[in-house]
Amino acid sequence: MQVIRDGIIFITLLLLFSGCIDPFTPEVEDIPEMIVISGRISDQEGYHYVEVSRSTSYNEPYKQSIQKCTVTIADDKDNRFELDEITPGKYQCWIGKEFLNQGTYYWVEVTTPDGKQYKSDSETLVPCPPIESIYYEEKKEDTENPDKPIYGIQFYVNTDATGYGSRNFLWSMTETWEYHSAYMVSDYYDGEIHFMYEYFDSLYYCWSSANIYDIFTFTTENLTSARVTRCPLNFVTNQTNRLSVKYSLLVSQYSISDNAYNYWNTLQHQSQGTGGFYETQPASITGNIHCTSHPDETVLGYFMVASVTQKRVFVPRNYDFVVYTPACGLYDLNTAGLNELLKGYRKRDYPIFLVNLSLTEAGPWDFADQYCFDCRKQGGTVTKPDFWE
Amino acid sequence: MKTPVTILLLFLALRVFSQEPDHFIRGSFNAVPLSTFIREAEQQAGLRFFYRNEWIENITVTAQGDSLSLREVLTGSLKITDIYYYIDTLNTVILTKGMVLITSLAGTVLSDAVSDHFASKGRNGLVTETEKSYIEGRKKIKAETIIIGDLTSMKQGKPVLVRGRMTDKESGEPLIGATAYVRETGQGYATDFDGQFLITLPAGTYDVVFNCLGMEEINYYLTLNADGPLAIEMNRKLIPLDEVKITADRFHNVRGTQMGYEHITLKTMKEIPVVMGERDVLKVAQMLPGVQTMGEGTSGFNVRGSAADQNMFFINKMPVYNTAHLLGFFSAFNPDLVKDFTLYKSNIPAKYGGRLSSIFILNSPRGNKKKLTARGGISPITGHLMVEGPLKKEKHSFILAARSTYSDWLLSQLDNPGLRNSHAAFYDLAGHLNFEPDEKNTIRIFGYYSHDKFSLSAQNQHFLYDNKGASADWKHQWRPNLTSEIALIASNYAFQIVDSSESSTKAYRHQYTIGHYEFRSDFVWIPGRHLVNFGLNSVLYQLDRGTIEPAGLLSTRNIVFLGAEKGLETALYLADEYELYPGITLAAGMRYSIYGMPGPSVVYDYYDGSPKDELYISDTLRYSGKDIIATYSGPELRASLNIRTGESSSVKVSYNKTRQYLFMLSNTLAVSPADQWKLCDYHIRPPHTDQVSVGYYKDFEEKNINFSSEVYYKKTKDIIEYKDGASFISEDPIETQLLQGDQQAYGVELMLRKSTGRLSGWLSYCYSSSTIQVDGSNSWDKINHGLTYPSNYDKPHAVNAVINYRFSRQLSIGSNVVYNTGRPVTYPVAVFYVNNREQMYYSKRNEYRIPDYFRMDLAINVEGNLKARKLAHSSWMLNVYNLTGRKNAYSVFFEAEGSQIKSYKLSIFGTPLFTITWNFKFGNYASD
């Protein structure tokens, strides 16, 4: 049973003393490639995407796009939308509001360069309720070292779907967070040390964004009311700089069909929360697309028709726990040592930022890793996003 | 000359002689026929010999000398025969066959030649005497003679039935699997669970050797006149070190018709290193050929490639549905409670049924009938104590046993965070009363309760289950050759889960219970040379799958009533074992079982040719409590043939058919504690198995080694397999979650075993295959596209070695070595991207295997001092589990990290595990 399986991953970690999880690569034989058609149409005006690719072997995975396909989204009102290939394997088109109506059935048709034709089952747009709230709770996760647990915030979502007729939901999220470098830039070296009279915050404030790849689904099918209460979403730990200044989560809530729910839920359990004691046989799930010329062909991927609502939340730093940021110790170097160090850098690394221990141009200066000064080196950008509060 | 011997008897009875005369012959006889010697003696000494030619046809004489003593020559040549001689004072020599001439009246005192050891016994109702002036027989008297039955009750031509019983002299416990070997016929007899055996032989005197592992061998002459009882008390062997030659033929391996049968006693179990120093009977069973598990820490067995629900476990006739404590790390059987266990793998006797693959029978000790004693022990995880003693000395006895963990303390010491804050506990209690009011009646009452509780606080799951039950058994001897055993048994297994792991809105509670109420009657009848077993066995199952209810304030889960059901399984059986020709024994039995499921219930019927799904319901059938929803029945033939191919080798062939009327809802690869049992019903047909096996067995007596080899082939129809994503806690009726198909299993099991001596143990190798095919006519009735796939427990190669070496009485070392091929697994064979995230596409079901399993354990057992007089005796066992520290794969799993899939191997034990256990018992080293 899945529930026991999830929990009992801990039991396996050894009731008795030392359980182990080790990386392991199974040797498997390659199988013929299969086509993957994946796309989504929502009720929001804008670009809608379909991707066409092929599966690759497990031992050497890569994304093998299929280019030059003819991709068309059609609806049961005789509208057809041709998609253009914008990047290899990714096809988009703009669909205006007037075409995106609740109750209309949509499907996709794809013709690959080798002439094969594929078509998805049709699905309809069902109204999606607004997200009632996204909130978080501080959570502690124990680790193998009892003195060093992990802290973080666990997000939850509440939605009231009463009256909307939708009962299956899929959430996808994008996270954006603000972080700062350890030191503001001031004195720097580009062949010689420049003494600046002040600090500049141009490389101090950064923002980073990332997609959250985990899948979150929920169904209210066996519940007495059509309410989603406290459904767990992602868990953000204090082990990165995400929670160091301000964190924002943009949650997109899709109202999906039973079929789509079955598909995403199966994918979710394939690779999230595995490693338990009581595993069941894994199941391959093929989705809702078929090859019209060869009905027996396996087609992976899903074309999902879903209404979407979004909500963004901001979480300022206000936690009971410590957030870990990259170590930024100062290297205490006398002048000779500092010169040696600086001569090791090449022109393209300039400027090298330094910390002035006195307020004078005589120094001395200490060295620190450059990402401590230039926040961009941790992956972000100094451009503040439009939506940022 | 030929003269009727009987007339001579009368004639000679009138003569009383105090001296035995001798005569002297001169000559050189070199393997000459006895008849020739006789003629010579007649001539030389003027003697007259009376005998029958056919008695002495093959006897030769070898002697040389001028003054050969006739007595000595006759003694020497007749030594290994059953011919006796008597020389009277009138130069007459009479030869008799099979009996010694009685020349004086009975009632004389015991000869001094007989050791006091045998002389001091006084068995009720039996006369132990040695005739004073036996005609000097062919042997020196080394054992006394026991006379069974009155001469006056002797019936001409009718075989004599001896009801024997062998017990441990010190405690009164019956000896199971002890043997009695009759030299004259070369036939052996083994004792049953009550220490009883039956010998049927024509009237006469026989040289019988009694043996039991760990006991001193005893040799008696039995003079059988008429039916009667025989009680043999055996002494413990206190010197197990030097080679004690067991000269009597080992019975069980070669001579019994039973095959596919393993029998392990307490003594063997003591020396096998196990986890946590616990003498776990189920862990021992895993070392036997043909028995596998899904991995460490899982409960349930796979016997000969079959699912875990195809095995049944009985302790003192009470069935136990969940044999695992703490998710399988310990078994539910307190080691103190298990005296021995028997496993029937292929040739299941007709008296047992209800499960397809195997029956495990565990017996508890009866209780020391002589004195009150106790024993117990402490290991890092558990403590156990057993008290036993007489209720009425030499007659009635009792046992009380308890075991418990104190694991929470242990969990809090662990590294793993999830477990550190969790709670786990179990305990079990058992009691047994044994009443023997007289020779013909035994009444036994047994009660058992085991309880497990487990909470995973990190995941918010709480879990508890218990097994409870009792059995009452009355064994009665109606006639010497007819006994019956009537038993009433009740057993109940129940579990409860509260699971809030998925989300608070979906938190639920589930309670489940299954009751098993049984009536058993087993008769054993021995008319002449047949051994007939017959009886009636009836089980009422009452199970309530319970309700899925919301748990906690936030849960909005719908209540789902899973429903209750009942079933009645009745079986009649008749079996006979008969020796067709010397050395060829046939055992054939028929068990006929009938199953019925009464209402009330609501059953859906589906359209033909459509999937079983709520969309295709064609009819709703409502049954009341008086209706029968489904019945199934069928014969189960159990037959085996034992052909003795040599002095110590035999070939056995058996055919078995079994049926099973209930099964476990389990789509996890290992048995989970939340798995529910379900009865066969309107839609779900009972699976049935046909098994054929052929075995060759050989005993190497000089070395005390037994070799057994068995080849089997099993075909099961209507085996139950679950669809992907099956759920057992939803409203969907179970028939929508499963499909029934075929399973095929075959294999070879080889085992070499040495049971005595300093070095003992066994080595076994099995090659096996177990595959399943679910290939219905429609695509929705197929699993794996209708292709055959290996079952989850198909492990082609399995090697088990158990080695014990006893350095001295106090120190012994044991080691286990286990190797098997990894179990089948379904791996991803392709990767594709959806929204830039890796997804997996899987191979055919069970197309691959996880890495192989290898493990070595070591145990060092140190006994306390060997003083004979002491209050209590203790011993220490140091145990290392997984000595090489190999990280055996339990599973291989795939976890998404960011956009990529990473694969890992999960092992249960990654380093060697050291434990120390301390055990004590009242009495001394040899007490049990």
Image: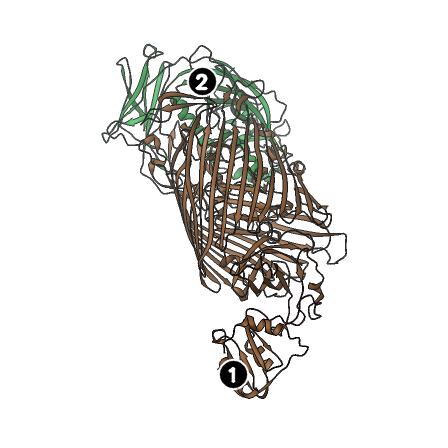
Chain colours: A green, B brown
Res. B23 in view: yes
> Horizontal and vertical percent for residue A90?
33, 26
Q: Which chain carries label 1?
A: B
The answer to whether one can see residue A22 in this image is no
Q: In this view, does A91 lie to the left or right of B400?
A: left
Residue B37 tag number: 1
Please tell me whether mark 1 sits on a helix, a strand or a loop.
helix
From the top left corner, tell me how far across and down residue B7 is, in percent: 56, 72
Q: Nearer the viewer, residue B460 or B609?
A: B609
Can you say whether B683 is above or below B317 in the image?
above
Question: Residue B760, percent across and down?
Answer: 57, 59
The reply to whether the magenta stretch includes residue B110 is: yes
Q: Is residue A103 left or right of residue B249?
A: left
Pointer 1: residues within 10 angstroms few (<14), some, or many (20+)? many
Q: What residue type is labelled 1?
A: Phe
Which quadrant would residue B407 be assigned to in this image?
top right
User: What residue is shown with label 2?
Assistant: A253
Q: Mark 2 lies on which chain?
A: A
Instruction: Have a look at marks 1 and 2 and say if they share a chain.
Output: no
Crowding near the residue tagged with mark 2, few <14, some 14–19, many ≥20 C-alpha atoms within 10 Å: many
In this picture, which residue range is highlighted in magenta?
B98-112
Camera-nearest residue between B476 and A92: B476
Q: Across the whole image, how many numbered discs are drawn on residues?
A: 2
Let me know if residue B172 is in the magenta part: no
Q: Which of A50 and B322 is in front in this view?
A: B322
Find residue B615 and report its image quarter: top left
Q: Nearer the viewer, mark 1 or mark 2?
A: 1
* Element class at badge 2: strand
Q: In this view, does B852 lie above or below A181?
A: below
- The amino acid on which the numbered mark 2 sits, given as a three-letter code, is Gln
